[in-house]
Image: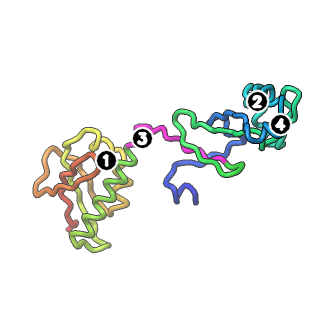
Amino acid sequence: LIKTEVNIKAVEYLDDASGVLSKKVKPNFKALGPKFGKDMKTVAAAISGMNNEHIKQLETENQIQVGGFEIGLEDVEILTEDLPGYLTAQDGNLTVALDIHITEELKFEGIARDFVNKIQNYRKDTGFEVTDKINIQLQNNNEELATAILANKAYICEEVQALSLEVVDWVKDAVELEMEEYILIVNVNVYS
């Protein structure tokens, strides 16, 4: 359900978020002053020296012994920072990370999906019947576009009910459709 709803390829469950975000801890001076008084600077220094294992223990147990002092979760502010290539969000103990590396294959799939959308809208705007089978010719005016379309030809044909999809040097009776960074020069006709 998650994969379908948010348009992702895979969901992976991790026991720990250390591979997708880094955590840092800062002293919460408002809590430390009244609690530790004259020892506040020493406690703050101990908190600043905490490592990832300390932070994890503090989050799990809500308290930890650091520098001879009992530090509670309320005594610190835990900051998270996305690692390069990830976007993360947290809610309580749940962290969700999105791997935002775009491979060539993913880019081509995105182009193919946009192409399907443009062809479906064209079918609708032109008054094609839902059951009409079509033929598509696409002019090769961009190598990346042509490569993406051909790499995902079976998917595209299935989605738009195309019996043929050709990438050619020139298209007769073409229309131009705008798609993100490409201009589609296509001829879409009902199969007869």
Instruction: Choose mark 2 or mark 1, whichever is in front.
Output: 2
| The disc label shown at residue 44, or none | 2
Label 3 Cα crowd, 10 Å radius (few <14 / some 14-19 / many 20+): few
* Numbered range of the magenta stretch: 95-107
Going by the numbered disc 3, the residue's amino acid type is: Glu
Going by the numbered disc 2, the residue's amino acid type is: Ala
- Secondary-structure class at tag 4: strand
Residue that badge 1 annotates: 149
Q: Which residue appears at 84% of the width and 35% of the height?
A: 36
In the rendered image, residue 101 lying in the magenta stretch gets the answer yes
> Which mark sits nearer the N-terminus, 2 or 3?
2
Going by the numbered disc 1, the residue's amino acid type is: Ile
Instruction: Choose mark 2 or mark 3, whichever is in front.
Output: 2
Residue that badge 4 annotates: 71
Q: CA distance from mark 4 to mark 2?
A: 10 Å
Residue 15: image quadrant is top right
Residue that badge 3 annotates: 105
Instruction: Choose mark 1 or mark 4, whichever is in front.
Output: 4
